[in-house]
Image (cartoon, helix red, strand yellow):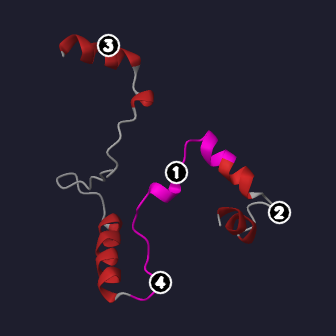
Amino acid sequence: MLADKMVELEYVESISYVSVRNILKKNELKPWKVKGWVIPPEQNSEFVAHREQVLDVYKRPYDEDNPVVCMDESPEELMEECNSTLMEGARKRG
């Protein structure tokens, strides 16, 4: 399915299903385990209304007293990206 879509979208001229599997495995990606928000295939007025409310928030001018804060809903910590000196200090305090 991903291989066909990549060809359809012209990301590549051709790619085998095995190549896609190997790339996903190498990068430890498991898209079939991820559940996310997508635009429903049928027009859902309630979904569209809520989506528009969220998008309107991002269009607001910056307000120092009420900043917009985006939160990642993923429960994982990206420990590889931490500064080692910060990690050392955290261990000493903990």
Which residue lies at the image location 40% right of the left edge and 17% below the top edge? 84
The residue that label 4 is drawn on is: 41
Task: Answer with left or right where residue 27 lies relative to residue 67.
Answer: right
Q: Could you tell which of marks 4 and 2 lies nearer the N-terminus? A: 2
Q: Position of residue 86 (x, y in %)?
A: 33, 19
Instruction: Label 4: state its secondary structure.
Output: loop
Identify the amino acid type marked 3. Answer: Glu
Residue 38 located left or right of residue 17:
left
Residue at disc 2, secondary structure: loop
Q: Quick check: 29 left or right of 52?
A: right
Q: Residue furthest front?
A: 18
Disc 3 from disc 1: Cα separation:
32 Å
Q: Label 2: how many residues lie within 10 Å, few (<14), some (14-19) or many (20+)?
A: few
Camera-side residue of 34 and 52 = 34
**Label whose residue precedes the other's in the sequence (1 or 2):** 2
Residue pointed to by mark 2? 13
- Between label 1 and label 2, give the one nearer the viewer: 1
Mark 1 residue type = Lys
